[in-house]
Image: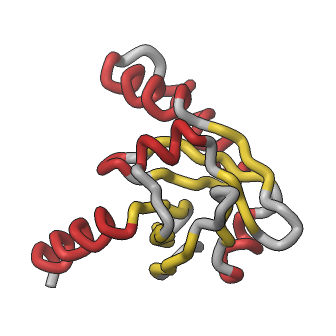
Amino acid sequence: MFIGEHTHTVDEKNRFSLPAKFRKDLGKKVVVTRGKDRCLVLYPHKTWLEISSEVKQKGHVESDQKYARFTFSGASEIEIDSIGRILIPEFLRDFAELKNTIVLTGVHDKVEIWNDKKWATYRRKLESEFA
């Protein structure tokens, strides 16, 4: 299970390190795709296969097709390097407006990757709604 909030810096080659607590559960291969609210979502490969199976079973309902198009067309398989870094494809970095500082949030079975300023705004909204 992924929990917590972690701020990281993106290096000059557009890579960043994953938190050590996330690496074990992520494995060596992950899938990253577009998420709601302009963040990215990082899934362990096994979880991605489960999601893929669920989407396939839902059939041809229009709302499900739109979700599938949005999610699967923006997905990329990524290998985690030997020291726990990943490189997000440019089109996904652009979508999420990732700059030098990013925030990784654990959300149960996935990790969200946020532009630090967007996350701060969104977190304040969540805090006012739930606190």
Residue 46 appears in view: no
Where residue 94 sits: x, y (%)?
A: 46, 43
In the image, is residue 13 above or below residue 106? above
Where residue 38 sits: x, y (%)?
A: 35, 48
Which residue: 54% across, 42% down? 33
Task: Please state which of residues 35 and 57 is positioned toward the viewer in this rendering.
Answer: 35
Residue 99 appears in view: yes
Count of residue discs: 0
* Residue 98 located left or right of residue 12: left
Where residue 88 sits: x, y (%)?
A: 63, 49
Which residue: 56% across, 73% down? 9
Q: Quadrant of residue 119?
A: bottom left
In the image, is residue 97 above or below residue 21? above
* Residue 44 located left or right of residue 9: right
- Specify the quadrant that holds the N terminus: bottom right
User: Looking at this rendering, what residue extends furthest in the right direction?
Assistant: 82
